[in-house]
Amino acid sequence: MKIKVKVNNVGHGLCISLIHENGKVMLWDCGHNEDCRPSVFLPRSGISEIGIFFVTNYDEDHISDLPELRRKLHISTLHRNRSISKEQLISLKRQSGPISPAMQSMLDMYNTPVKPPEFPSVTYSCYYNNYETDFVDSNNISLVTFLTCNGYKFIIPGDLEKPGWEKLLNDTNFCRELQDVKTFIASHHGRENGYCEKVFEHCCPDVVVFSDASIKHETQKMSGIYARHARGIQFGGRTRHVLSTRQDGALEWPL
C-alpha cells in the first residue's frame, strides 16, 4: 500500500495530512497561512472528502481554516477530546474573547459521528486527559494520536504540556504505545512547556519534528534538547535529529 503522510508548512500552526492510495484522507488539524491552506491544496489534488478529521487542540492555530475546509470538502468522521461538552468549550473559549468563526465552525460539527472508513495498512489510537476532572485548560486536554502506516509509527500530541504528559504516562497502554514511535511531532510547536523528559524514558524516536513559523517562542533552543532523545536520520545529505517546517519546509513520508 502507498501512503503519504505530510506535515504541511502552515507556519505557527498544525496541519498533517495522510493520503492513501485508495484516495481516502486523514487530516490532523487545519491550521493555515497565506501560502498553505488545506481547503486549497486538498481540492487541487482532486480530494473532495476527508474520511477522518482529528482536532488535536481547540485553539485557533489548529482550526483556522475549518470554515473554508467544511465549505469545500465533506468531513465524514470527527475525532476530538469528547470529555468537554459544547457548553464547556464555549465557556472556556469566551475567557479569552469572542467565539471566532473557526471555533463556531468547530462547534457546529461537534456532534459529527465517529464512524471511520477503512484505511488498509493504517492503524491509529487516541488518548486524552479529561476536562475538569484532570485539567481546565485547552492544551492539557489535547488529543494525542499514535498513527502507524505500514509498520512506521508517528505520535501527534497537539499542544500537550508537561503536566498533561505526566498524567497520560500513568496509563500503561499509553506508555506501551510510545515504545516504537519513529517520528515524534513535538508538542506545542516545540515550545519548552510542551517538553516532558519522562516521555523519552519510554521512546527513542528516529527524528523529532517541529511545526512552527520562523524563530518564535524560543523553539530554537529546544532543538538541542529534543535532539538528545533521537537516533537521527539521513536528510539533505547529513544526519539530522530534529526537523522543522520553518527550516525545512513541508515534510513528507512516503510509506
Image: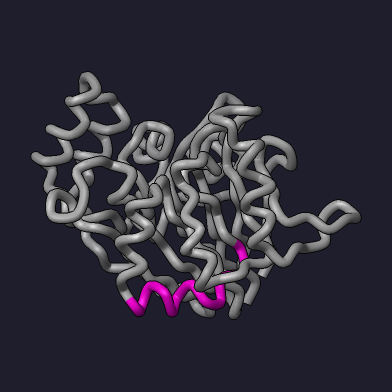
Q: Is residue 111 visible?
A: no
26 vs 225, left or right, is left
| Residue 28: percent from left, percent from top | 44, 52
| Residue 114: percent from left, percent from top | 25, 64
| Residue 127: percent from left, percent from top | 32, 65
Check the image and report above or below for 232 versus 217: below
Between residue 149 and residue 20, name the one nearer to us: 149
Is residue 255 found inside the magenta-colored segment of the image?
no
30 vs 237, left or right, is left
| Residue 97: percent from left, percent from top | 23, 19
In the current view of this chain or complex, which residue is farthest to the left?
87
Quarter where residue 181 is shown? bottom right
In the current view of this chain or complex, which residue is farthest to the right?
237
Q: How is the image coloured?
A: one colour
* Residue in the image at 83% along x and 61% along y: 234
Between residue 119 and residue 56, name the one nearer to us: 56
Between residue 112 and residue 72, name the one nearer to us: 112
- State the count of labels: 0
Image quarter hosting the C terminus: bottom right
* Residue in the image at 60% along x and 78% along y: 150
Q: Is residue 237 visible?
A: yes
* Residue in the image at 54% along x and 65% along y: 200
Is residue 179 found inside the magenta-colored segment of the image?
yes
80 vs 39, left or right, is left
Quarter where residue 21 is shown? bottom right
Quarter where residue 182 is shown? bottom right
* Residue in the image at 46% along x and 50% along y: 48
Image quarter hosting the N terminus: bottom right
The magenta-colored residue range is: 172-183
